Image (cartoon, rainbow, N blue to C red):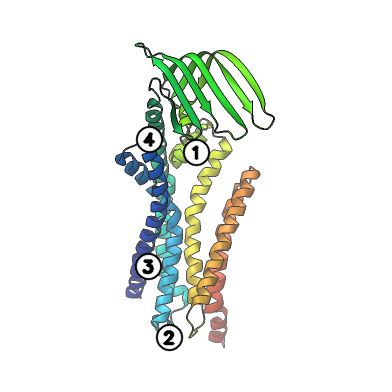
Amino acid sequence: MARINTYILKQLLVLFGFFALVLVLIYWINRAVRLFDRLIADGQSAMVFLELTFLTLPWIISVIAPIAGFSAVVFVVNRLASDNELVILNMAGLSASAIAKPVWIFAISLAGLIMVLSNILVPISQAQLHQRQLEVAENLTARLLTEGTFLTPSDDVTFYLRQITAEGELEGVFLHDTSDRSKNLTYSAAKAFLVRSDVGPRLVLIDGLIQNLDLFTDRLTVTKFNDFVINIGQIVSPRSKAQKNIDHFTSFEILDHIIKGTAPRGITAFGAVFALHQRITGPLLSVFLVLIGYAVMVTAPFSRFGLWRPVLTAVFYLITLKFLEGLCLDYVRRTEGTVWVMYLPLFFGFLSAYSIILSRDRPWAKSQEAVQ
């Protein structure tokens, strides 16, 4: 039995590695192409592109790992059935529950991998990615310091600077922003300063005015000011948000905040608790995705047309379980204090998998035969 378990487990690991590699490459290349176009258009180097794309890999792996595990177990059981190895195991007296031991080991190992990714590696990589995006935004903002030229760092922004003094003062500043589809904003100032801060670059305008054109009413509002601060990094590079969110903190950091009764800036206490539970339920759910795939395939009746029907049934269970997870997450977001609802998909997955397996093994029938 130990050799059989090792044989099945080895196949599961090999096929998981194959499916994970293929899915990661597809997902990663799709994101990398869009990121490459944006960074190269902004004048960034290829090294910046490679660094930012590699920082997204932990998140991508955590997303595709459950699907790769599900695909691996469906493919392996299908191949065991096609090669009549599953029939031999059944004829040897092994039940579906007994054959499931290597599948359990594989599923728990997969959940452990996703747990490490979701709770430690993904937050660390996302925090580093966030910091690098801020630095890229600052570099992009620094390119605006060109005298006497109208610059368009993005399709929605036009910037003009008349002169830079020896003291670093910007004179004759003009900024036109059309990123908001409901209005056009035009900033002009006699002087300005470009300053750095912990939350990204800021443009401090001195002695100027703001012209706000409402595109729905064609009404122009003019506001004069003595000094005004603009988040220039957010305007020039909208994707780089200065403030961290909950995804940038490891679970240990979130737990430390919860114990101390505090929450990171901009994050509610419920948001921290919700994120922590989601990082627990998500990896655990992958266990039951794998078990449901195994249960449907191992209990499928023989068909000379192949096992395409049980494959579709397994995919249906997968979609149903993920849909139920989404419903529970949405309900918890809207109703604070019901975090326990997030664990309902786990019970549904366990009951679904073992109701299918036990319907095949029928241990109650065997016990009645033994009594007779």
Q: Amino acid at mark 1?
A: Ile
Q: CA distance from mark 3 to mark 2?
A: 22 Å
Circle nearer the viewer, 4 or 2: 4
Residue 363 is at least partly visible in this image: no
Q: CA distance from mark 3 to mark 1?
A: 34 Å
Secondary element at tag 3: helix
Q: Amino acid at mark 3?
A: Leu
Circle nearer the viewer, 3 or 4: 4
Q: Which residue is mark 2?
A: 91
Q: Which residue is mark 4?
A: 132
Give percent across and percent down for residue 348: 58, 62
Give percent across and percent down for residue 117: 40, 49
Q: CA distance from mark 2 to mark 1?
A: 53 Å
Cβ atoms at labels 3 and 1 below 8 Å apart: no
Q: Which residue is mark 3?
A: 12
Which residue is pictured at 33% across the width and 42% down the height?
Answer: 51
